[in-house]
Image: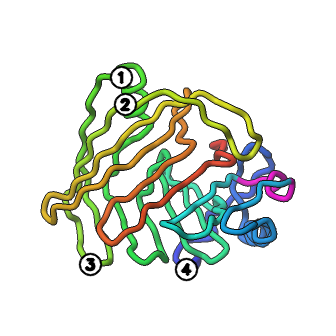
Amino acid sequence: MISLIKLYLFIVLISLSGCIAGPSLYSEALRTSLIAIKSNEILIDDRIRNIPYAMQISKIGNSDEVLLVLVEERNGDLIWTSATKELIVTRAGKVIKTIGLLNDIEITNPPDLNKISNEIYHNNDLQYEFKSLITFTDPKASLLEIKYNYSFIQKEKYVNRLNSKEVNVFVIEERVRIPLIKFKAKNYYWVDDEFNVLKSIQKTAPNMKFIELVSLKKYNGK
């Protein structure tokens, strides 16, 4: 599936805080990550810590954890791939497109989670609403209206799996509805005080398993 994106846009960076992996280098990083699998969880050891690319862990439904490496940034959208070549595209921590899953989705005009989390952080009583369009493959449907409602849940402590450091986060609930097919779901985002999504649990279409994403190294934006 990796051929579906334009590899000539890849940029190799040298910052260890989270860069984009070049075409050959991300493959090496993913091979390294396979060695670190223990049972159904990724063992965070020096082999993972020394991978110099933006990374996150993905878990779909009850599947084993998979390491995702960032391979492209395109106008704010981050394109991640796994060792088995599935693609997940995120914007500000929200999954907006998938390729290679059982039910692939694509969201047109997705909500801006950076803006939403900022506003909710400063006003915990705010109820934020937004509308987008969604396309998915099982059952096949194109450009259905999808509605979101966001609200503050709570503040809590969050432990980064890469370095075991504890940070303050707040949890946002996202209630999703596709009125035409009467689909509903509740999603959750763990957001730090710089409005980075450190963890999320997301589902936006029927016959789609929940996608859990855990950030290990964020993209530094360079």
The amino acid type found where label 1 is placed reads Asn
Tell me the tag on residue 141.
none
Distance (Cα) linking label 3 and label 2 = 32 Å
Q: How many marks?
A: 4
> Mark 4 or mark 3, which is nearer the start of the sequence?
4
Q: Quadrant of the C terminus?
A: top right
Label 3–label 4 contact, CB within 8 A:
no
Q: Which residue is mark 4?
A: 1
> Mark 2 or mark 1, which is nearer the start of the sequence?
1
Q: Describe the element under mark 3 as helix, strand or loop.
A: loop
* Vertical relation: 132 (above or below) 207: above
**Residue in the foreground of this view, choosing between 74 and 95:** 95
> Mark 2 or mark 3, which is nearer the start of the sequence?
3
Tell me the tag on residue 152.
2
The amino acid type found where label 4 is placed reads Met
Distance (Cα) linking label 1 and label 3 = 37 Å
The amino acid type found where label 3 is placed reads Pro
Query: For the magenta stretch, what is the residue range?
Result: 46-53
Label 3–label 2 contact, CB within 8 A:
no
Residue pictured at 35% horizontal, 23% vertical: 124
Label 1–label 2 contact, CB within 8 A:
yes
> Mark 3 or mark 1, which is nearer the start of the sequence?
1
Q: Which residue is mark 1?
A: 124
Q: Which residue is mark 3?
A: 139
Query: Where is residue 178 shown, x and y percent of the image?
Result: 20, 58
Q: Residue furthest left?
A: 180
Of badges 3 and 4, nearer the viewer stands: 3
Q: Describe the element under mark 2 as helix, strand or loop.
A: strand
Q: Describe the element under mark 1 as helix, strand or loop.
A: loop
Residue pictured at 51% horizontal, 35% vertical: 191
